[in-house]
Image (tube, rainbow, N blue to C red):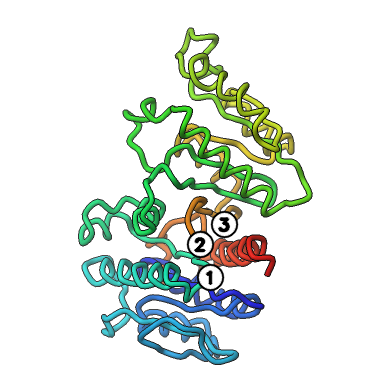
Amino acid sequence: MKPVIAITMGDPSGIGPEIIARCLESASRISRPIVFGHWPTLRQALDDIGAGTRVQLMERAKPAEPDTIAIVPTEDDGPPIEEQGERSSRAQFESLEKAVDSALDGTCDCLATGPVSKEQISRIAPGFIGHTEYLAERCGLARDDVTMIFMSEKLAVGLLTTHVPMNRIALTITTERYERTTGHMVALLKEMRPDERPRIAIAAFNPHAGEGGLLGNEEVGILEPFCRDIRGRVDAEITGPTPADTVFRDAMNGRYDGVIAAYHDQAMIPLKLMGAGQTVNITMGLPFVRTSPDHGTAHDIARTGVADPAGMRLAIDAAVKLWRARTNG
C-alpha cells in the first residue's frame, strides 16, 4: 500500500517549485502525492523541465486518479510568483496550513515540506520562526515536545534546541531536554535501522567538555549525571559528554550512529560540510511523519534550471520509509 504524502511547495519565489517538479515522477512510484502550493508557478516549473505529468486540481485534499498528481492550489491564481513579497509570503504559508490540516485530519499519512522563507512568513504570521515550532503548535504540543533530527545514510544528529538566539543557549541545557532528545533519537534509529543497537554520543556544551568545571559547569552539573543515569534506561549505547570538536569527526568515521548536539549551529556546521542534499530533516514527536530537505530557498539560483532535487527526493523517500516502519505498511 502506498501512503498519501502531502508535499508543500515552500517559497514559490525560491527553488521549491523546480525541485518538486523534478521529484513528482519518483514520488508517485512510492506514494500518492498531493502537492500544496501556487499552481501557476508549479505549472511553469513543470513546463520548464518538459514534464508530462498529469495533474488534477482539487479544492480539498484527496488522492488523485491513478498516474495523476493531486494539486491543492492556493487562492492566488495569478501569474507565476518570481519575486519575494506579499504574494510569495501568503502562498507559502497558505500551502503549509492546508497541508498540515490534511495531516491532522488523516487525509495524508505524512508530510514533506519544501523550503520556506521564515522572514517572509513572519511578516504575515507574526511569531513564525520555523516549520518545527509551527508544527508543534498546530498539533497542540509545546516546543519542547518535538525534536529536530537530521539524518543521513551514515549519521543522525539531534538538536537539543532549534531556533534560539546564541545569548540564550546556556539556559536551554537541561536534563529534561536531553531526556526528550535522546529518547527521540533512540526511537528514530530503531525505526530506520531495526536490526542495530544504536550508538549515540552526547556532544559537550563547553570547549574540552568543560575541563572538569574549569571552562563551564554544564558538563559536571548536568551532562555527566544525565549520561550515567540514562545508560541503564534506554536500549542504546550512550557515550559522553564528548568534546564537540572531536565527536563529529568520530561519528563521520563510523564510531557513532547518532549525536545529540547542544545547539543549532553545533550540529549544522559539520552537517553542511558533509554536503547539501545529503541529510533529511525529521521532526520527531508529532502525531504524523514530517520530513524536509536540508537546504533553504536558494533564491539566487531559482528559475535557472540548476537546482538539485536530491534533498527533496531524499525527504520524500525518508517520509515513506518512516511511515512504513511505524505502520508495518
Whole-angstrom CA distance, mark 1 to mark 2, is 7 Å
- Quarter of the figure with the N terminus: bottom right
The answer to whether residue 204 is above or below residue 210 is below
Q: Position of residue 289 (x, y in %)?
A: 53, 61
Look at label 3 and name its amino acid. Gly
Work out whether mark 2 precedes mark 3 in sequence or the reverse, and give the earlier one. 3
Report the number of numbered marks.
Answer: 3
Indicate the secondary structure of the residue bearing disc 1. loop
Q: Which mark is residue 229?
A: none
Indicate the secondary structure of the residue bearing disc 2. loop
Direction from residue 127 to residue 168 in the image, left or right: right
Indicate the secondary structure of the residue bearing disc 3. loop
Dot 2, how many residues are within 10 Å of its Cα: few (below 14), some (14-19), or many (20+)? some
Look at label 2 and name its amino acid. Phe
Dot 3, how many residues are within 10 Å of its Cα: few (below 14), some (14-19), or many (20+)? some
Q: Nearer the viewer, mark 2 or mark 3?
A: 2
Q: Position of residue 113 (x, y in %)?
A: 46, 64
Look at label 1 and name its amino acid. Asp
Q: Nearer the viewer, residue 281 or 303?
A: 281
Q: Nearer the viewer, residue 130 or 299?
A: 130
Q: Which residue is mark 3?
A: 277
- Quarter of the figure with the C terminus: bottom right
Q: Which mark is residue 288?
A: 2
Whole-angstrom CA distance, mark 3 to mark 1, is 24 Å
- CB within 8 Å, label 1 to label 2: yes
Would residue 140 be seen by someone viewing this image from the given angle? Answer: yes
Q: Which residue is mark 1?
A: 109
Whole-angstrom CA distance, mark 2 to mark 3, is 23 Å
Work out whether mark 3 precedes mark 1 in sequence or the reverse, and give the earlier one. 1
Q: Residue furthest toward the right?
A: 195
The answer to whether residue 40 is above or below residue 17 is below
